[in-house]
Image: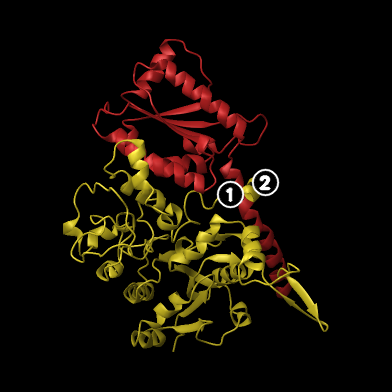
Chain colours: A yellow, B red
Amino acid sequence: MPDKPKVAFYWCASCGGCEESIVDLAEGILDVVAAVDIVMWPVAMDFKKSDVAAMPDGSILVAMINGAIRTSEQEEMAKLLRRKSKIVIAYGSCAHTGGIPGLANQFSREQILNYVYEQTPSTVNPEKTRPELKFGTNGDSVTLPVFFDGVRSLDQVVEVEYYLPGCPPTPKLLSQAIEVLLSGKLPPKGAVLAPDIALCDECPKKDTKPNDLQFTEFKRAHWAQIDPAKCLLAQGFICMGPATRGGCGGQCISGNMPCTGCFGPTSRVKDQGAKILSALASQILAKNETEIDATLGTIADPIGTFYRYGLPASLLRRKINEETKANA
Amino acid sequence: MLSNLSQNTTNEKWEPKIVAFFCNWCTYTAADLAGVSRLKHAPNARIIRVMCSGRVDPQFILDAFAKGADGVLIGGCHPGDCHYMEGNYKALRRMRLLHRMMYDMGIEKDRFRLEWISASEGEKVRTVINDMVEKIRALGPLGLPKRFVEWDKEMESFEERVLGKEEAVHA
């Protein structure tokens, strides 16, 4: 009997939700296990790095890697799996565009370490001890990975064949992707394995979206009662739908929550944040600077709202702060 | 045109590079007028003619900075004068928010400017460009392409170490 195709799952800077989404295949996972051999899956199975390292290069059919790249350990594992795999899939928002961990690109490594090890209210660290890369005790030495200065999406570190978007990707998209991969009818390299349409296109509230939204203020979801029958933008809530790829089935919208943009942009858009900024701001009602600014002032955190899942993959990639300026 | 911006960033003698998006109906015509009136201004602005300031997608501006611009200038018709009725208002609304967001991302406010310049205001083209060049000269280069390379060096150095290690394991 010929060998079954080999599949690896790995996690980098992530929350574990992507792992959960694989288990969310429910009994469908039995079909997957019947069709493939899982050769690495740290969250569920006991394979070691050395097991993968011992495999011939290119012997794994697909490696699905979730999480952004923040440490040298994650970089090393991504590069190892790249070398051993024919196809690498960036699984979930963090691997795809940087995800929530990518919001840390608003701060330098020094700002983050300083805050975490010295400034948080719960920290007691009078000697200002910081983690060391190497530490010896009783003749043994232990090491820690390097904490990089920035967060990167997977394709900023290794070559990536396909992307499965979402925070996390839906079981439906995952099972479709597995079906496609096993069929051998591969989509063109670089494809995002989800429909290439904006979320508004498949939104259940689509028919209630007016042509001109005429914003006078931007509301946050916890500020006001949401009318379940009406377009969220028409009610003044920031919904990322116009600048976000569909394919999720509008789950948040159906749950009466605005889209936060986890599926990333469509193929025609380079920078999701700039695009939603453009879509929202251009439809403000006011025409003079003072009134426009008053309306815009109701957006508390433009970067955190517009780039919630995609700061590392955006055009600017990260905040230019004093330390990165000094490096230039 | 934008791809050329990233070249020539090695500082022999740095000169501010400004990408200017000028509306066809007002500011571009004003720049033409400045030319035929033989008004001298700093040669640092690369002018791109667009049909309307409302056509300037915020992505264009971020892309210009990411590809090596030190400043971006948008010129459109005065409020009420837009050839397409509403385009300059849309530009104004977008740019107010973009300006704030870029500042939050560490791009100094003087690197970005939106100006209303009508077709008859050739003199204003000159003063705006000259003033912007001076302000950016004082700020120094933004140099994002170079910074991206610097940022990624932390991985290159690591790659050498790891590949070196793996080769040693294979040997």
Q: Is residue A109 visible?
A: yes
Name the foreground residue: A193 vs A283. A283
Quadrant in which residue A171 is drawn: bottom left
- Residue type for callout 1: Phe
Q: Is residue A153 visible?
A: no
Quadrant in which residue A51 is drawn: bottom right
- Residue type for callout 2: Ala
Which chain contains the residue that carries disc 2? Answer: A
Q: Residue at x 69, y 71 (%)?
A: B166
Q: Position of residue A241 (x, y in %)?
A: 30, 58
Residue holding disc 1 = B148
Badge 2 crowding class, 10 Å Cα cut-off, few under 14, some 14 to 19, many 20 or more, is few
Q: Is residue B90 above or below residue A15?
A: above
Q: Position of residue A101 (x, y in %)?
A: 51, 65
Residue holding disc 2 = A326
Q: What mark, if any, has residue A128 been given in the picture? A: none
Which chain contains the residue that carries disc 1? Answer: B
Name the foreground residue: B162 vs A205. A205
Q: Position of residue A82 (x, y in %)?
A: 55, 68
Q: Position of residue A111 (x, y in %)?
A: 63, 58
